[in-house]
Amino acid sequence: MDFLQDMLNIPGTSPDYVILTGIAISAFVIIYGLSGIMAGDAPTIRRMQAGTVKRAHGADFDLIQGDDSDPHGLLKTFVPSSRKERSKIEKKLRRAGVRGKHAVRSFYGFRMIMGIVLPVLFVGSMALPAEVQSQLHIAHLLRNVTWVNAMQVMTGLMVVGFYGPALWLHGRIKKRRQAIEHSLPNALDLMQVAMEAGLGFDAAMTRVSHELAHAAPEISQEFMMLQLELQAGKDRQAALLDMADRVGVEELSAFANVILQSNQFGTSVSTALNRFATDMRSDRELRAQEKANRLPVQMSAVMAMCMMPVLLMICLTPMAIRWMNMF
């Protein structure tokens, strides 16, 4: 208590801001604790870890899985102790194209830092002198802020800082899936041309990954990952299925099944790729037509919501005027 009293009596330190900062930190700890309780703790089987291989374009990434060791020391404060939860987040990070030995730790550490930094910046901006606030053009925003408003803003900033990266990760996964779906037919056409020119399947995929490094980096990265896994001694079937599971795109899963079936039954891989690319473009066209056919129904609902009040006013206003004249 003496220490707190001495700290509050320091010149230039406002007790209100000190108490407000303590409330912000306490609320963040409670929010993080609840999120940790809601996470499951059932252990999963740990996959073998492969070394890091440098791809031709200069990026470093792990072949199979990153660092999945149990957190220890200070890492326990922000990294989940459940291996199942860590594996789930690592899978999402891989689908978003974020790879690295400590990707999971960096992601949770960034969430923790953002959840603390945003409220601290808000409290610091409130503690600035009026002249500095005027120079930063934030004085009119903080002029009428009360204690209740400040606590509400800090709680909102903590929620945004802690759960904002998770929303960003979800959007990044969706955007990357769309990019892979869009570029996969072109990649298959290039692979077919390379195979008809005399290259084997592995050489054609490597050539396509280099050619599409700038036009379609997402599919290029996945193809290069597949080739590196094959060079490391991984089974072809396991590597193709792992690529499909890692990306989470249905078309890529179908591509893996087409290649495996062609190798199993001895059919032409080039012909299979040509037909599969054609089917993908047909499916894309059908999906676009489906969206176009849904538009009239959706527009009719919006038009009804906008027109019904006007029609009711036109029909009921004369009746209302007659009733007013009668009574």
Image (cartoon, rainbow, N blue to C red):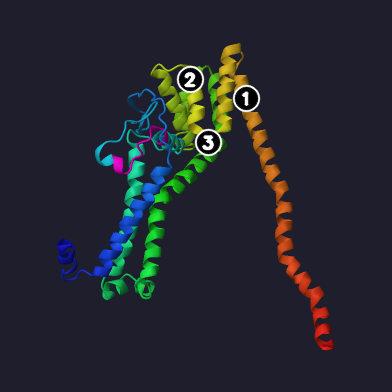
Check if residue 84 falls in the magenta segment.
yes
Residue 266 visible to the viewer: no
Q: CA distance from mark 2 to mark 3?
A: 20 Å
What quarter of the picture does the N terminus occupy? Answer: bottom left
Find disc 3 in the rendering and name its residue.
180
Of the numbered discs 2 and 3, the one sitting upstream in the chain is: 3
Residue 92 higher or lower than 132, as above or below: above
Q: Position of residue 261 (x, y in %)?
A: 59, 17
In the picture provided, is 180 more to the left or to the right than 93?
A: right
Amino acid type, label 3: Ile
Q: Residues within 10 Å of mark 1 (few under 14, many from 20)?
A: some
Q: Return the mark for residue 238.
A: 2
Q: Position of residue 253 (x, y in %)?
A: 56, 27
Quarter of the rendering containing residue 99: top left
Of the numbered discs 3 and 1, the one sitting upstream in the chain is: 3
Q: Return the mark for residue 181.
A: none
Residue drawn 81% across and 83% down? Answer: 321
Q: Nearer the viewer, residue 207 or 30?
A: 30
Amino acid type, label 1: Asn
Q: Residues within 10 Å of mark 2 (few under 14, many from 20)?
A: few
Of the numbered discs 1 and 2, the one sitting upstream in the chain is: 2
What quarter of the picture does the C terminus occupy? Answer: bottom right
Residue drawn 37% across and 49% down? Answer: 32
Q: Which residues are magenta?
A: 76-85
Quick one: SS at disc 2?
helix
Marks 2,3: beta carbons within 8 A: no
Q: Return the mark for residue 274.
A: 1
- Number of dots carrying numbers: 3
